[in-house]
Image (cartoon, rainbow, N blue to C red):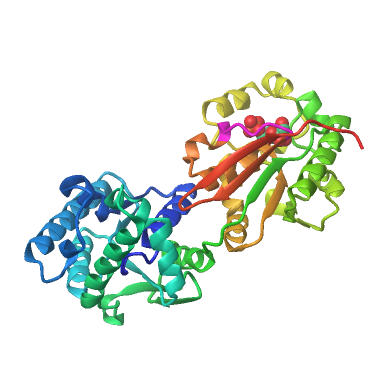
Amino acid sequence: MVGLPARGKTHMARRVARYLRWLGVRTQVFNVGNYRRQVLGPRQPARFFDPDNADGRAARRRMALQALDDMLGWFASGGEVGIYDATNTTAARREMLAKRMRAHGLDVVFVESVCEDESVIESNIRQTKLHMPDYAGVDPDAAVRDFRARIAHYESAYEPVEESEGSYVRVIDVGRKVVAHRIQGYLPSRLVYFLMNLHVVPRSIWLTRHGQSTFNRENRVGGDPPLSEAGLGFAHSLAEHVRESGVRPRVWVSTLRRTQMTAEPLGLPFEEWRSLDEIDAGDCDAMTYGEIREQMPVDFEARRKDKLAYRYPRGESYLDVVRRLEPVIFELERERRPVLVIAHQAVLRALYAYLMDRPPSEVPYLPVPLHTLMKLTPITYACEEVRVELEPRLA
Ligand code: F6P
């Protein structure tokens, strides 16, 4: 990462890490500020960051090298993407880091965050920096003054990334403008595309399974069954709850009847996504779990042993579901209005894992009960969650 303090670098770093981890890429963020806070203590006055302060400069360099060593060690033990989160605002610092990284066989991409919009910087300072241990118990106005003095020190030595330094992405005003230079390969391209879609506008993302279906009642998987009586009752409760909340969300459903029947009483237009269809149970479609155990014991056992990677014969695995949900994730990131997703158990487990930053290994077991609305609100790095159980009510 490259950029002055309060340019949202840590936010971007963590969001990118969450996305890549969800895709199954071993990713870790190394935040140099955390090393400074841990080793030198959280309370360093602005003058510590003055480029003319030799002691401060040496201490900051030591922290930077320590984080770099840890990151290189982590790569040696199988890490795939390391995000080195620091200001890295001078060309000399970047050259020193990139040289060592390249010597270890790593490809380096600089992600530079530039903010020309003063209001974004002000809100970043007030919303995140003042809550850091650096300013615990300090008067907010004094803290803002100190932080601005810290920024000014960095500004005096700041050199934006140049083309001669190699691959970079420059993100200006949280995605208003994105410049990509010498971006090659799959992951760097995904990175640029992801950064183009990020925004920091607060809005809610609501997730729910469809109302109970006739198959749910019989413990049958897959198929395209209609809602049961209770399921229809849930659809009405959901509609009432959404109306009372005053929120008018975009509504996304799958191509399957049970999600569309759940959406109908809302009286809102809904968008159909094939990617939101339930995990394809292939040859097991429409069977009960009991029938699968009796008729296909080898498959039943294989799924029990590795539910994440197990692929139904002529169907899908959870890993397949995660991959096909990537466009949904991008659209969720891009969207600024509230969204209500009405989908299915396996699909919602995968979406929930992304939003709540849960590891892939947990995906197949995350609890996503019927008739429960999960209201997620993205905060800085993950989401706040409220679950509302809705009793089925007949119209
Ligand atoms: O049982 C309802 C259902 O949506 C099925 O259609 C689907 O196969 C299943 O849940 C997914 O859950 P699990 O992976 O735990 O079997």
Say which quarter of the image contains residue 349. Answer: top right
Residue range (magenta):
364-371
54 lies above or below 387 = below
Q: Main secondary structure of the magenta part?
A: loop
Residue at image position (49%, 48%) is: 382
In the foreground, 357 or 224:
357
Taking the magenta stretch, the answer to whether it contains residue 36 is no
User: Where's residue 151, x and y in %?
Assistant: 28, 69
Q: In this view, does 15 lie to the left or right of 355?
A: left
Residue 232 coordinates in the image, percent (x, y): 86, 36
Q: Is residue 145 above or below residue 239?
A: below
Quarter containing the C terminus? top right
Quadrant where the N terminus sits is bottom left
Query: Is residue 385 shown left or right of residue 121?
Result: right
Q: Tell how many labels.
A: 0
Judging depth in this view, the residue of 113 and 297 nearest the camera is 113
Q: Farthest residue in the left direction? A: 54
Residue ranking furthest to the bottom? 163
In this rendering, is residue 227 above or below 343?
Answer: above
Residue 197 picture location, percent across and down:
54, 66
Task: Determine the residue positioned at 37% across, 76% down.
Answer: 182
Name, please, the residue furthest toward the right.
395
Residue 286 in sight: yes
Name the foreground residue: 206 vs 72: 206
Q: Residue at x 63, y 56 (%)?
A: 328
Q: For ligand 1, which image quadrant applies?
A: top right
- Residue 283 occupies which quadrant of the picture? top right
Q: In which quarter of the image is residue 169?
A: bottom left
Q: Is residue 370 magenta?
A: yes
